[in-house]
Image (cartoon, rainbow, N blue to C red):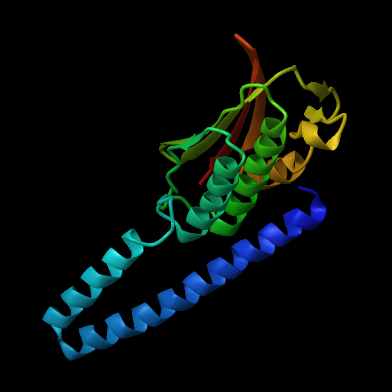
Amino acid sequence: PGPKADVTFIKDMYEKIRAMRHDMGNHMAVIEGLVDKGEREALDEYIGQWKKNYEESGMSVKTGNPIIDVAISEFAGRFEKSDIPFEHSFRYPEQLQINPFDMSVVITNALQNAYEASVSAQDPSVKLTSVIRDNTFIISLKNHIDSKAYIDPEEELPVSSKKEDGHGYGLKNIRTIARKYKGDIEIRQEVDKDGYIFVLNVMFIG
């Protein structure tokens, strides 16, 4: 996908987010009204139905934050259509003061890079995980690549020889956001039996 496709994807994603926020506002108004009237039975029934509808929705990813749910779900669908194995255990760190829109920029840029790199890989796979320790939150994204990427010694970022290589785009944005939260990024390339595993770790201090 080229720049135009990326813009369309981002626009579609944020339209879904806006719709979810609008629905959330309506739900909260109903709940507040039932609380004010002391309608406990009706409140329990409403919340139960709301939870059931959410669980039965088409959202395939539940991270603890609706914005990140949309972002990862969109890419999960893209990976599936391209027959690229994708797994994640990402959980949003609610206890830390990290803006979900900043997080969504990190997630979408990282997954876009992994997708572009995986399209041409012989044996593609992508794995997204997260871990939290006290006030430190780390995102780790791993994907298989056939050959080692060249790292610019000054920028300390991969350089793409062509568009499909992936990883050469968006990493500056990811690093900028990580540093905004007093963190940084780490890039590793681990030897694998059929090539290399490209590892991107993003650290935030909440």
- Would residue 184 appear left or right of 95 to someone viewing this image? right
132 in relation to 97, above or below: above
Marks counted in the figure total 0
From the top left corner, tell me how far across and down residue 46 is, in percent: 23, 77
User: Who is closer to the viewer here, 84 or 174?
Assistant: 84
In the picture as drawn, the residue positioned furthest to the left comes out as 41
Residue at x 41% of width, y 53% of height? 94
From the top left corner, tell me how far across and down residue 21 is, in percent: 49, 72
- Would residue 180 appear left or right of 43 to someone viewing this image? right
Residue at x 60% of width, y 46% of height? 78
- Would residue 120 appear left or right of 206 to someone viewing this image? right
Residue 186: quadrant of the picture: top right
**Res 56 seen here:** yes
107 in relation to 184, above or below: below
Residue at x 84% of width, y 22% of height? 153
From the top left corner, tell me how far across and down residue 137 is, in percent: 49, 39
